[in-house]
């Protein structure tokens, strides 16, 4: 293990894979929105948002695009979170 100088830090490594539902919830929380507020911004009703956040339904391209537009991120961040973790961190 390389010894770091005082004040130098190594970046943390991810410990868990995220699902699309977890990403949606995380982005919504970062915006400080309720599901009802996200519903207004995305055009997806709150019931379906709950199902998406709990990974009970597949995201699909259209929904990913709607949510991406609401969050102002690329749809791949929502559809493929395991590949886009760095972009999700930037959104935070």
Image: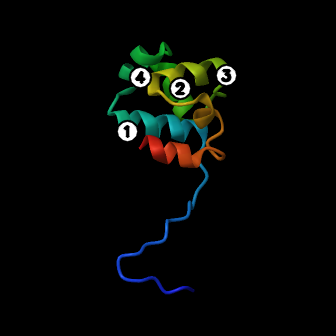
Q: Nearer the viewer, residue 79 or 21?
A: 79
Asked if marks 4 and 1 touch (Cβ < 8 Å), the reply is no
Q: Nearer the viewer, residue 62 or 5?
A: 5
Earlier in the chain: of badge 2 and badge 3, it is 3
Q: Which mark is residue 61?
A: 3
Image spot of residue 40 (x, y percent): 40, 14
Q: Which mark is residue 30?
A: 1
Marks 1/3: CA distance? 22 Å
Earlier in the chain: of badge 2 and badge 4, it is 4
Secondary structure type for disc 4: helix
Q: Which residue is identified by label 4? A: 38
Earlier in the chain: of badge 3 and badge 4, it is 4
Q: Is residue 39 left or right of residue 19?
A: left
In front: label 2 or label 4: 2
* Number of residues whose C-alpha sits closer than 10 Å to that of mark 2, classed few (under 14), some (14–19) or many (20 or more): many
Q: Which mark is residue 49?
A: none
Marks 4/1: CA distance? 12 Å
Q: Is residue 64 above or below residue 29?
A: above
Q: Which residue is identified by label 2? A: 68
Earlier in the chain: of badge 2 and badge 1, it is 1
Secondary structure type for disc 3: helix
Marks 2/4: CA distance? 11 Å
Secondary structure type for disc 1: helix
Image spot of residue 91 (x, y percent): 45, 40
* Number of residues whose C-alpha sits closer than 10 Å to that of mark 1, classed few (under 14), some (14–19) or many (20 or more): few
Marks 2/3: CA distance? 10 Å
């Amino acid at each position: 293990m390389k010894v770091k100088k005082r004040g130098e830090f190594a970046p943390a490594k991810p410990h868990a894979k995220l699902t699309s539902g977890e990403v949606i919830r995380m982005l919504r929380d970062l915006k400080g929105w309720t599901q009802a507020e996200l519903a207004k911004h995305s055009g997806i009703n709150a019931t379906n948002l709950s199902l998406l956040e709990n990974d009970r339904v597949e995201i699909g391209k259209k929904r990913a695009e709607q949510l991406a537009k609401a969050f102002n991120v690329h749809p791949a961040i929502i559809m493929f979170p395991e590949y886009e973790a760095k972009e999700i961190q930037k959104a935070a």
